[in-house]
Amino acid sequence: MEKRKNPLATEFWTTLSTDELSKRLHELGPDDIVFTPEYYCVSSGQTLPPTDSVRMLVSSSSAPIYTIFSGQLGSGVVGGSMNTLADMGRATRALIDEILEGQVTDHNEVRAPTAMVQLDWRQLHQWNIPEARIPPNAIVHFRPPSLLELYRSQPIVGAFICIAQGALIVALLFERRRRQKTAKALAQSQKQATDVARAARLTFFEWNFDSAAPVGPSRKPSCAPNFTKNEFERVIDEVHPSDREHLRSAVQHAIDRGEELNLEYRTLGPDGRPSWVSVRGHAAPNGQARIAGFCMDINDRKLEQLQSAQDRAALTQMARVSTMGQLSAAIAHQLNQPLMAILCNAETARKMLGRNEPSLEELKRILSDIVEENVRAGDIIRNLTALYRNGVTDRTAFDLNELVLETAELLRAELTARNVVTRVELAPELPAFDGSRIQIQQVLFNLMLNAADAMAETKIGHRLLILRSAMKNESLQICVIDHGDGITPTALERIFQPFWTTKPQGVGVGLTISRTIVEAHGGSLCASNRLEGGAQFCLSLPAQTAT
């Protein structure tokens, strides 16, 4: 048995009076146990025997009681590791027999038998002790007998009768099934073949070029008929002129080499319209001029294939035009931001040049901003073109927190003009992300400007834009949170669809492009409403450290 790390707390109540002992037993908790080897209780001036005293202890105790005397089982104790009085008597008799036989030594003693765990079934259930905790070799008393123990012979006899009857029934059913199987086999096989042929629009045939008489039913112009050599030319006349020679050579080739016949050809109906037929068969061996197989009307399938080919061509052309349209709209939408920044910086520089003593340092900074915005515009065109071409962009390792701060700084003037207050809540020590810095920044631009637009009708002083980064489920997450009116359920379902927008002057490609960029990086972009009001757009990127 494994030794406990924390020994159990043990109390000895051998000096307590009967009343004090009863009180202490009543105050025990569900995690306590009581062990009594033997207790002689004094009640009304009389000494009670151990069994009666144990009953008194059981009636007062709020915890299970264990003992070492088997004679006390049934008085309310759970049980314990114990020997019966009969076992002790046998051991004592063995000692007496040794002494009477002259085997007297200084070490004669009663050899106690091995103690066995004996338990009271009723007390196990009373104290909710599961059976799984009962030792395998324990003796359980007062266990109610099972139905099988009470009526052992009756279930055996009944089971034997049921098995015998079941075996007889199975034998009779098997014999009946065997007799019916032969009678139904041919009919079932024929029915299945008919059903399959009807469902697949098949017609079975046999072409016999050695016989002068027709074989099988009359010929059907729409499908491969049963015919003889004399009728073959009439069948050829109903085949489309472009397919006649192909059919003639294929049939002759299959007969000459004893190979499979598999071809499709067109027949001409009474109205002159062509109808497609598929024929599959195999020539007979040993040089016999006979081909057996099936034919199938495939006119509907052929028409669908031709229509599908036309539809695919049209869809390809539409996709090409749509892609070019999306690319043009996306470039125009994305370039609007750096061009506006260039324009603002240029106007500021022009006004500064009108001063008597313009600040050269300020002009240098403005010109640097113009150059940076121009470079960013070029990166936007290059990266968007690469994204729509094959989804491949240049990737480098960068810090998402730094990118968030940089983007917020670039839009600081625009957000200030809209009376929007920006609050940044960044998680420390985020791992570096390996991706396209310019594309992820463009996503942040779109989300932040959309958040500012969403708060256009919000009261000034309540226009709060929150930028939050976090590590969630092993993914890097950036959320752009606004305090606007939120997103309507209809808009929430369609917000990422191309060219769908609620803005009067909007193009409807910003969020579509943003989701495409994020998914190209192996991440996701989702939108939701907040219980506190407003909406949030969260982009999740796979956490990975660039090597």
Image (tube, grey):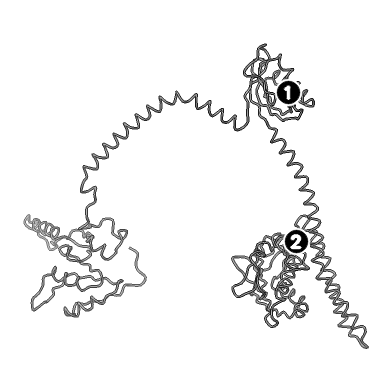
Q: Give the residue displayed 68% in from the left and 68% down from the top.
A: 432
Question: Where is 298 relative to 26, above or below?
Answer: above
Q: Position of residue 496 (x, y in %)?
A: 70, 62
Q: Position of residue 368 (x, y in %)?
A: 85, 76
**415 vs 95, nearest the viewer:** 415
Q: Amino acid at mark 1?
A: Ala
Of helix, strand and loop, which one carries label 1? Answer: helix
**441 vs 537, nearest the viewer:** 537
Q: Residues within 10 Å of mark 2 (few under 14, many from 20)?
A: some
Of helix, strand and loop, which one carries label 2? Answer: loop
| Residue 9 sits in quarter | bottom left
* Farthest residue, direction front: 271
Q: Which mark is residue 250?
A: 1
| Quarter of the C terminus within the rendering | bottom right
Residue hosting label 2:
499
Q: Give the residue displayed 75% in from the left and 57% down from the top.
A: 391
Asked whether the viewer can see residue 125, the reply is yes
| Quarter of the N terminus within the rendering | bottom left
- Frontmost of labels 2 and 1 is 2
